[in-house]
Image (cartoon, rainbow, N blue to C red):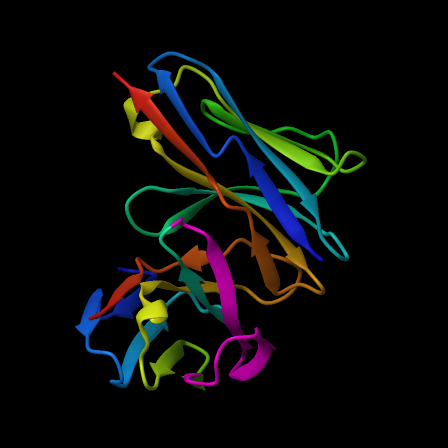
Amino acid sequence: DTAVSQTPKYLVTQMGNDKSIKCEQNLGHDTMYWYKQDSKKFLKIMFSYNNKELIINETVPNRFSPKSPDKAHLNLHINSLELGDSAVYFCASSPAGAPRPQHFGDGTRLSIL
Amino acid sequence: EDKVVQSPLSLVVHEGDTVTLNCSYEVTNFRSLLWYKQEKKAPTFLFMLTSSGIEKKSGRLSSILDKKELFSILNITATQTGDSAIYLCAGPTSGTYKYIFGTGTRLKVLA
């Protein structure tokens, strides 16, 4: 019954490769997010989609491209991976409307060799 | 620039102690402040505070917001080892969907 599920949980890959992380939520929420959490545990928003429409696009390299095929799914594709991309990536969702608590997935730990 | 600052950065206490975690914020169009607990994996929601001076409580945890002074505190009484976690506070800014997180307070409770 996982509410927000991400795959894969771990991703170990070489510099220069392209990889994708998938996220699905079964909470019926309209808004989904991608966050990056660095080694110091600082959680920083990257993107947000509301009903498949991109509403937040923070200053991340354009090697990162989110895609939302429907409001229950938000995927993250990363091209030409760099060492600095190593982090834990969290997907989250929340109901639409006024600020609402977000539900987070368990994260994808990305390690670049 | 919008920011959320938490203190202390880390804290070690013994079971049974009471702790107070602090969160100060400067966010555009402030509407609410949220507290999360992060153990090994996903941050989990604790409280959302929108009104100044009204305490939210859940078991041994409680939180209050001071909109005039732009800060919030999270109290944990009679701490247990299971309270060991990183506690994060966040404020949505510039509308409703962009959440600024603080750096977190890492709490360790010793048996």
Q: Is residue B33 above or below residue A93?
A: above
Q: Quadrant of the N terminus of chain A?
A: bottom left
Q: Position of residue B105 (x, y in %)?
A: 46, 36
Q: Looking at the image, which residue sits at the far top?
A: B16
Q: Image quadrant for the C terminus of chain A?
A: bottom left
Question: Would residue A8 be found to the left or right of residue B60 on screen?
Answer: left
**Residue A111 versus residue A69: which sits nearer the camera?**
A111
Figure quadrant of residue B111: top left
Residue A30 visible (yes or no): no
Q: Residue at x 77, y 57 (%)?
A: B29
Q: Which residues are magenta?
A: A40-64
Total labels drawn: 0
What residue lies at 30% left-to-right and 66% top-to-bottom? Answer: A5
The correct choice, above or below, for A55 with respect to A90 in the image is below
**In the displayed structure, does residue A77 sit left or right of residue A93?**
left
Residue displayed at 28% across by 60% down: A2
Percent from the top left, x then y, of residue B2?
69, 55
How far from the left and from the top, in percent, is residue B19?
48, 20
Q: Is residue B86 visible?
A: yes
Could you tell whether A4 is left or right of B87 in the image? left
Q: Residue at x 35, y 70 (%)?
A: A85
Residue A38 among those drawn in magenta: no
Residue at the right extreme, as displayed: B68
Residue B16 x %, y %:
37, 12
Q: Compared with residue A65, is residue B6 higher up or lower down, i.e. above or below? A: above
A59 in the magenta segment: yes
Residue B28's place in the image compared with A79, above or below, is above
